[in-house]
Structures are given as C-alpha cells and as structure tokens.
C-alpha cells in the first residue's frame, strides 16, 4: 500500500515541479517583459498627461491675456479630448505589445479590429460624424462658452460645448441641444466686436437737421452712461436717415461693443436713453394718420356722359 501511495505522489510532484519551472521561466522571460511593458505604459500615460497639462497652462497664459477668460472654456474642452485620445493611444499600444509577448498574432487582431471598427462606424455614422465635426469646432474655436450664436436655425448663449453636442440657452430660457454634425453655418455675435443698431422713428413735423442734431447729443449721452459706457469700444455714431415710411422717417444710430459683451442689455439701455433725450428736446413721437375712405360718387368725379345743366340766367 505504501508503494502504491508513493507511486501516486511521484507523478503529482513531477507535475508541480514542471509547473513551477514553467512559471519560473515565464517570470524570468515573458513575465518580466510584460511587467516592464505595464510599467512603461503607466509612465507614458503619466508623461502624456503632464505634457498636455503644461501645454494647456502655457497656452492659457499667452492667449487669455489677449482674448479674455471666455477662451478658457474652449481650451478646457479641447484639452479634455486630447487627454482622452492620448491616454487611449498609449494604452492600446501597450496592450498590443503585451499580447505580442504572449504569442498572440497582433496582425490578425488589428485586421479584425479594423473590420469591426468599419462595421461599427458604418452603423453609427451619425455619431462618428458628430464627434469628428465637434473636434474641428473645438480646434478652430468657432465659438466658445458665453458666446451668443445662431446655429441650425436657433439662437442663444452657449452654455456647454462637447464633442457631440452644443447646448444653447435662448432668451426665453429654453435649452437647445444641437448635434455637432448638424452645424453647417455659425453666426457668432460675440466673436471679436459686435455692432448694435438703434432705429429711431421721427415724425415728419421734425426737420431732418434738427433730428440729427438731437441724435448727436444722444450719442454723447450713451457714451457717458455709467451702465453701458464701459462696454462700448467707441462712441456711437449717427448713420443718418435710413428709411421713409407713411407717418415717420427712420434715423439709425450704431454702436460698436467690446468682445463677449451681451448686446441685449445694451440695446435696452440705449432705447431708454433715447426716449429720455427725445422728451427733453421736444421731439414729437410719430403718430399714424387715420385715412377715411371717400364716398364712391365723390371719388369717381362727375359723370362725363350726363347732360350738362344750362347756366342760370341773371334774371333767375
């Protein structure tokens, strides 16, 4: 019995010895290489993050001093995407190197991944289109957080920008979420400087020279106003008479606003000042004229076919 028990233990000990030898060989050769690849991948990810972080801070210091704090939103969104892409590339390269050490045919794996990626991209082409277009929007800086823009037929203030969508807040409080792939034409009202135009309706009883003289004073009032004077790049200018209508003529005043200034409060304050100046200067408000229709007989005139009445004699 002891002989049979010893014979049973001997093969088990040999198997354990072979497994230990295999693990030892793997640890000295392939295992060591895999550990080194993992450490190298971790170090590379760390270096990529440090490099992108320092690059972002350097760009912010050089550009924000010129373009203002609104540029920070675009740079943050762009560098977030670059962080993800950089880490993903490093991790994929490390994983492929580790699989090659284990004897996996990485060429066939890459070919299969390419076919799978093509199938997924074809099935989700709308999402891929949104992501690619969003990347270009961020890289080109067509708009950033806080800008007032019009895209895809909606207007609002940009509250959030990602690779896939742009979130706008309309003036009535509505939220519009626009996919990046649907952005074809961007109208940015906050890029650089913007222009505000105020059309003043003036009654025909006021001469044009008098109206333009009052509007010049109005421009000085706007430029010296405490609330909006600092938002103007220069004093407003009178463009002149812009149109003639039934009961009034239109004179236009234009003002150039500083970058990233909301035009709506400026326009409201400018109209308030305009009303006050017109009241102080006695400029009459235009009043529509009520036209009454004439009777049909009067409008048609005398009938030329009717017999003429002989003139009355002096004795009659």
Image (tube, rainbow, N blue to C red):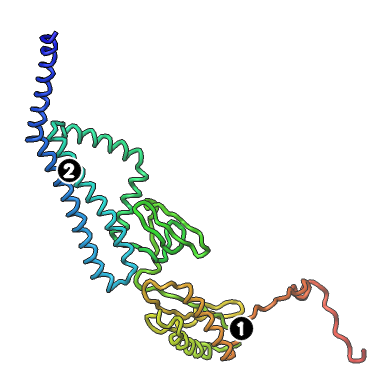
In the image, residue 54 sits, relative to residue 241, either above or below, namely above
The residue depicted at 81 percent of the width and 73 percent of the height is 306
The residue depicted at 13 percent of the width and 41 percent of the height is 35
The kind of secondary structure element at disc 1 is loop
Q: Count up the numbered dots.
A: 2
The residue depicted at 54 percent of the width and 87 percent of the height is 277
What residue is disc 1 on?
285
In the image, residue 150 sits, relative to residue 86, either above or below, namely below
Q: Nearer the viewer, residue 153 or 27?
A: 27
Q: Nearer the viewer, residue 121 or 8?
A: 8
Mark drawn on residue 93: 2
The residue depicted at 10 percent of the width and 35 percent of the height is 27
Residue 238's spot in the image, x, y percent?
45, 84
Q: Is residue 9 left or right of residue 281?
A: left
Q: Quadrant of residue 128?
A: top left
Q: Nearer the viewer, residue 3 or 219?
A: 3
The kind of secondary structure element at disc 2 is helix
Chain-order first, disc 1 or disc 2: 2
Q: On the rendered image, what quadrant is the N terminus found in? A: top left
In the image, residue 49 sits, relative to residue 316, either above or below, namely above
């Amino acid at each position: 019995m002891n002989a049979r028990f010893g014979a049973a233990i001997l093969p088990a000990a040999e198997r354990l010895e072979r497994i230990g030898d295999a693990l030892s060989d793997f640890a000295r050769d392939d295992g060591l290489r895999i550990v080194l690849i993992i450490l190298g991948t971790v170090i590379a990810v760390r270096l990529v993050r440090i490099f992108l972080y320092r690059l972002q801070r350097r760009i912010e210091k050089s550009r924000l001093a010129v373009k203002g704090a609104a540029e920070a939103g675009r740079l943050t969104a762009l560098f977030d995407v670059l962080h993800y892409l950089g880490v993903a590339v490093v991790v994929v390269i490390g994983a492929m190197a580790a699989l090659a050490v284990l004897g996996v045919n990485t060429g066939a794996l890459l070919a299969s991944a390419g076919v799978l990626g093509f199938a997924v991209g074809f099935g989700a082409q709308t999402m891929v289109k949104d992501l690619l277009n969003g990347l270009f929007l961020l890289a080109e800086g067509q708009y950033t957080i806080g800008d007032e823009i019009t895209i895809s037929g909606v207007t609002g203030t940009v509250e959030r920008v990602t690779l896939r969508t742009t979130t706008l807040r309309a003036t009535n409080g509505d939220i519009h979420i626009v996919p990046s792939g649907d952005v074809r034409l961007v109208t940015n009202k906050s890029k650089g400087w913007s222009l505000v135009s105020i059309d003043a309706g003036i009654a025909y009883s006021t001469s044009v020279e008098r109206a333009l003289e009052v509007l010049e004073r109005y421009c000085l009032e706007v430029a010296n106003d405490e609330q909006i004077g600092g938002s103007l790049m220069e004093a407003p200018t009178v463009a002149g008479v812009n149109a003639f209508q039934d009961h009034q003529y239109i004179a236009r005043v234009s003002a150039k606003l500083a970058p990233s200034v909301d035009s709506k409060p400026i326009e409201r304050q400018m109209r308030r000042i305009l009303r006050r100046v017109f009241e102080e200067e006695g400029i009459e408000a235009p009043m529509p004229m009520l036209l009454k229709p004439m009777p049909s007989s009067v409008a048609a005139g005398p009938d030329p076919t009717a017999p003429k009445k002989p003139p009355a004699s002096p004795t009659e």
